[in-house]
């Protein structure tokens, strides 16, 4: 029997990336899952690949009406909700000081307002079953990344959102926790400079964390399963970094060999 046997889960932004990996793992653990996404083609393909137990609903997390209708439709389809995974997110590749107002409004609407609205619309269903919310933030919400300044701000807001929802949900037994992934392959899908088309993040310039490898979607999915399971029934209001130790502190990196081997390999103390 899986850790999530007979649980009913709504995973926003579940047609690709981390959301898809979380939905896939939830299904393997015995849950039934509804995923949302903006692109019907991607969503229906994800539903096909996920197979029995999965259902796709087209919904833009930045649209309050779509959030309300998809949360209600998910609960109706599943017969209730045990788990909400707030995962749908977008970003803009720009310094905060250079970010246009239109991009600010768009990213905040999806990454912060969308999370709150899904929590509000799912809450009554979760309270009936003493369920839980899992909010996907980022290590960028813990230590900011200048190149994606607004994204960092929104993910820092998600960390506090998760804490406040834990306080609100306590009397009804509704848990709320946050997962902060580090660098995970494949990269985020909806990230582009202002005015440019969103494209999947692709780079070979990964900074390898102390654990010795770049993260994978399965690492985040495993953390989500734990939070959603009865094993975490006394855990709420927490933030879990899934980053291979990247935010543990600054590592001393080897300098370029052009600077000399003596500097590249300082003596131990």
Image (cartoon, rainbow, N blue to C red):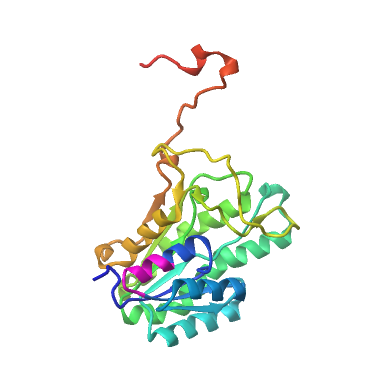
Q: Which is more toward the observer, 21 or 148?
A: 21
Q: Is residue 197 left or right of residue 260?
A: right
Q: Residue at x 49, y 12 (%)?
A: 262
Q: Relative to 254, does residue 9 appear above or below in the rendering?
A: below
Q: Relative to 21, does residue 207 appear above or below in the rendering?
A: above
Q: Where in the figure is residue 186, as x and y percent of width and height?
A: 53, 53
Q: Relative to 6, does residue 86 appear above or below in the rendering?
A: above
Q: Relative to 262, does residue 171 appear above or below in the rendering?
A: below
Q: Where in the figure is residue 163, as x and y percent of width and height?
A: 41, 61
Q: Where in the figure is residue 150, as x and y percent of width and height?
A: 62, 53
Q: Residue at x 38, y 83 (%)?
A: 80
Q: Residue at x 55, y 13 (%)?
A: 260
Instruction: Classify the position of the N terminus by image quarter.
Output: bottom left
Magenta highlight range: 23-31
Count of numbered circles on the image:
0
Q: Which is more toward the observer, 220 or 45?
A: 45
Q: Residue furthest right?
A: 195
Q: Which is more toward the observer, 62 or 156?
A: 62
Q: Residue at x 26, y 66 (%)?
A: 233
Instruction: Classify the position of the C terminus by image quarter.
Output: top left
Quarter of the image for residue 114 reads: bottom right
Quarter of the image for residue 110 reads: bottom right
Q: Which is more toward the observer, 147 or 176?
A: 147
Q: Where in the figure is residue 118, as x and y percent of width and height?
A: 49, 74
Q: Is residue 99 left or right of residue 177?
A: right
Residue 199: say if magenta.
no
Q: Main secondary structure of the magenta part?
A: helix
């Amino acid at each position: 029997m899986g850790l999530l046997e007979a649980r009913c889960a709504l995973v926003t932004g579940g047609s690709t990336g981390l959301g898809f990996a979380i939905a896939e793992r939830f299904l393997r653990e015995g849950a039934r899952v509804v995923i949302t996404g903006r692109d019907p083609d991607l969503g229906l393909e994800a539903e096909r690949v996920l197979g029995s137990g999965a259902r796709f609903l087209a919904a833009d997390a930045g649209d309050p009406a779509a959030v309300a209708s998809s949360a209600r439709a998910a609960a109706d389809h599943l017969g209730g909700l045990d788990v909400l995974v707030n995962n749908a997110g977008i970003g803009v590749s720009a310094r905060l000081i250079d970010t246009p107002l239109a991009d600010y409004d768009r990213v905040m609407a999806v990454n912060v307002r969308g999370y709150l609205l899904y929590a509000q619309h799912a809450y009554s269903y979760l309270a009936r079953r003493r369920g839980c919310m899992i909010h996907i933030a980022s290590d960028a919400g813990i230590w900011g990344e200048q190149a994606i300044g607004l994204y960092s701000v929104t993910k820092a807001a998600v960390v506090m959102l998760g804490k406040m929802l834990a306080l609100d949900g306590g009397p009804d037994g509704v848990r709320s926790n946050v997962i902060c992934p580090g660098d995970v392959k494949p990269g985020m899908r909806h990230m582009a400079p202002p005015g440019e088309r969103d494209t999947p993040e692709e780079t070979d310039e990964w900074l390898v964390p102390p654990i010795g490898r770049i993260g994978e979607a399965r690492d985040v999915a495993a953390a989500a399963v734990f939070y959603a399971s009865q094993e975490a029934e006394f855990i709420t209001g927490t933030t879990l970094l899934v980053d291979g130790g990247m935010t543990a502190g600054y590592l001393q990196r080897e300098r370029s060999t052009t600077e000399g081997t003596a500097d590249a390999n300082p003596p131990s103390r």
